[in-house]
């Protein structure tokens, strides 16, 4: 592997800065120095006790926030950041820490996007009826070039941010994009969590219980089958802010609970139906518990491993925290890779995906926000083969949002179009 001059300098600097390293592997912690000289102690191994792992995740997130904050005091990184300053740095928070007023403002803004006219011409996507659908349509259109590709993380970062901007600029929302900490719902059970409890301050609850459903079967393409249990719902969402919303697009590749899948062609025609969920705590606990999240952050040493672990190495039997979140929601469009942004909770899930990436990037910031922070090509598992994704690869969100930007501008949450961190 090529080592850039910059990362060589970083390594040298670190070696000098830690002239007397403490022998700590037994305690499974390491001491890290922030740009402003402060030091912090971080875990190096995920605890198998999910309650301890949950604290480890908090420590890692605090480190990332402190680290980002301290770079604002460093002259050298200021020019790279353009206009992002400490005074306009926005902070994304976990759903359960928002006030009831903030939670309701968020869902009200999402309903507002669902009531606003689409920008996508109906000649291109006849089923896109609302501004909310512009985002779903863009995701459907690009699904095969944004998952298991070099653009996966950055594309979804830009997509989620653009949705947040639409809520703010087109629907008067004044807050930031909240996220879903999967580790918390794995502990409490998904159904009773503030996100999914069906109250007026939730993201709506479960689908109505549908009897007689079987497993969700993943696999195909010669891979061994992976069975996921059905959840506690399956039918239409009956409570909370989104109980009357219509899913207009899809399905394209909707996994059903009898081993088959359903599609409506390219999914771009008008197909209004209720939002369905099949909340599945067992999937959350198995694939996206706090230990899995901390492992996701601590184990991968390069972005190839990071993004493959997150999406699940095909055939490994593990669907990763990304798949874990999607299949915890279940239902329609929750189990449809193409149409999943048709459930508004998608953006809380991808907020957490992005938070996880942000923390991982901060652990080796130069390397992981630069060219070495990209791996993969422009097509799903490089099939059909396509060019490597680079810092110059352009991301275009079509009618959902603009402008097209290069990967270079999407690698840091505090430069390019972005100016946010997570707590
Ligand atoms: C996990 O850790 C918590 C907090 O330290 C402790 O109370 C609990 O007993 C541990 N659980 C197990 C199964 O060891
Ligand atoms: C960020 O750093 C500034 C000093 O530069 C400090 O005043 C502020 O409290 C810090 N904010 C956070 C969230 O740590
Ligand atoms: C932050 O504020 C500065 C001026 O205070 C402005 O130039 C810049 O565009 C803002 N950045 C963002 C990302 O809002
Ligand atoms: C699977 O379930 C769907 C939807 O309930 C149904 O239309 C289809 O016939 C079922 N397929 C099989 C093979 O049971
Ligand atoms: C947490 O997730 C990991 C990875 O998916 C899994 O191996 C482990 O069994 C899970 N832990 C618990 C307590 O379910
Ligand atoms: C694309 O990336 C792969 C893996 O990093 C590398 O082996 C290959 O040489 C690259 N191809 C080009 C054309 O740069
Ligand atoms: C779908 O993607 C293609 C590029 O892959 C683009 O040319 C086309 O405009 C997109 N359609 C919509 C409606 O965004
Ligand atoms: Cu996606």
Image (spheres, rainbow, N blue to C red):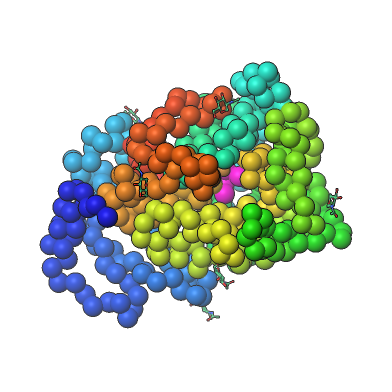
- Using residue 335 as the reference point, say whether residue 209 is left or right of it: right
Picture quarter with the N terminus: bottom left
Please state the horizontal and vertical placement of residue 365, each as a whole percent of the image.
Answer: 30, 51
The residue at the point 43 percent across, 51 percent down is 357
Is residue 265 visible in the rendered image? The answer is: yes
- Using residue 175 as the reference point, say whether residue 220 is left or right of it: right
Please state the horizontal and vertical placement of residue 70, each as a whole percent of the image.
Answer: 26, 49
The residue at the point 76 percent across, 28 percent down is 270
- Using residue 112 as the reference point, say whether residue 151 is left or right of it: left
Q: Quadrant of residue 273?
A: top right
Region in magenta: 344-349
| Residue 83 to residue 354: above or below | above
- In this rendering, the count of numbered labels is 0
Q: Quadrant of residue 418?
A: top left
Please state the horizontal and vertical placement of residue 205, each as a whole percent of the image.
Answer: 72, 50
The residue at the point 47 percent across, 69 percent down is 53
The residue sitting at the right extreme is: 211
- Using residue 415 as the reference point, say whether residue 178 is left or right of it: right
Is residue 132 visible in the rendered image? The answer is: no
The residue at the point 67 percent across, 55 percent down is 220
Please state the horizontal and vertical placement of residue 35, each as a whole percent of the image.
Answer: 22, 52
Q: Is residue 66 magenta?
A: no
Overall secondary structure of the magenta stretch?
Answer: helix
């Amino acid at each position: 592997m090529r080592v850039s001059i910059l990362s060589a300098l970083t390594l040298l600097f670190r070696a000098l800065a830690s002239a007397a390293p403490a022998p700590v592997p037994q305690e499974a912690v390491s001491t890290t120095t922030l740009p402003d000289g402060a030091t912090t102690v971080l875990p190096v191994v995920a605890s198998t006790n999910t309650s301890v792992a949950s604290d480890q995740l908090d420590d890692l997130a605090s480190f990332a926030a402190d680290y980002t904050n301290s770079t604002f005091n460093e002259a050298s990184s200021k020019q790279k950041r353009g206009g992002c300053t400490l005074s306009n740095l926005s902070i994304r928070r976990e759903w359960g820490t928002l006030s009831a007023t903030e939670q309701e403002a968020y869902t009200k803004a999402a309903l507002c996007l669902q009531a606003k006219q689409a920008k996508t011409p109906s000649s291109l996507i006849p089923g896109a009826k609302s501004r909310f659908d512009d985002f779903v349509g863009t995701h459907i259109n690009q699904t095969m070039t944004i998952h298991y590709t070099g653009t996966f993380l950055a594309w979804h970062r830009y997509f989620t941010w653009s949705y947040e901007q639409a809520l703010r600029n087109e629907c008067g929302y004044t807050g930031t994009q909240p996220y879903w900490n999967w580790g918390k719902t794995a502990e409490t059970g998904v159904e009773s969590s503030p996100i999914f409890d069906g109250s007026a301050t939730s993201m709506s609850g479960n689908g109505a219980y549908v009897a007689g459903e079987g497993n969700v079967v993943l696999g195909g393409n010669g891979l061994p089958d992976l069975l996921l249990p059905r959840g506690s719902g399956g039918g239409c969402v009956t409570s909370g802010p989104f109980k009357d919303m219509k899913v207009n697009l899809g399905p394209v590749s909707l996994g059903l609970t009898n081993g088959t899948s359903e599609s409506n062609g390219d999914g771009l025609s008008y197909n209004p139906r209720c939002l369905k969920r099949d909340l599945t705590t067992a999937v959350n606990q198995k694939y996206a518990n706090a230990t899995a999240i901390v492992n996701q952050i601590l184990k991968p040493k390069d972005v190839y491993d990071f993004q493959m672990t997150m999406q699940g190495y095909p055939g490994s039997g593990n669907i990763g925290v990304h798949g874990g979140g999607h299949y915890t929601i279940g239902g329609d469009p929750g189990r449809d890779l193409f149409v999943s942004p048709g459930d508004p909770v998608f953006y809380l899930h991808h907020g957490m995906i992005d938070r996880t990436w942000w923390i991982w990037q901060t652990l080796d910031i130069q390397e992981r926000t630069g060219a070495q922070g990209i791996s993969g090509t422009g097509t799903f598992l490089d099939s059909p083969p396509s060019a490597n994704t680079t810092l110059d690869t352009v991301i275009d969100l079509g009618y959902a949002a603009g402008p097209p930007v290069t990967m270079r501008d999407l690698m840091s949450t505090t430069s390019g179009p972005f100016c946010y961190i997570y707590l």
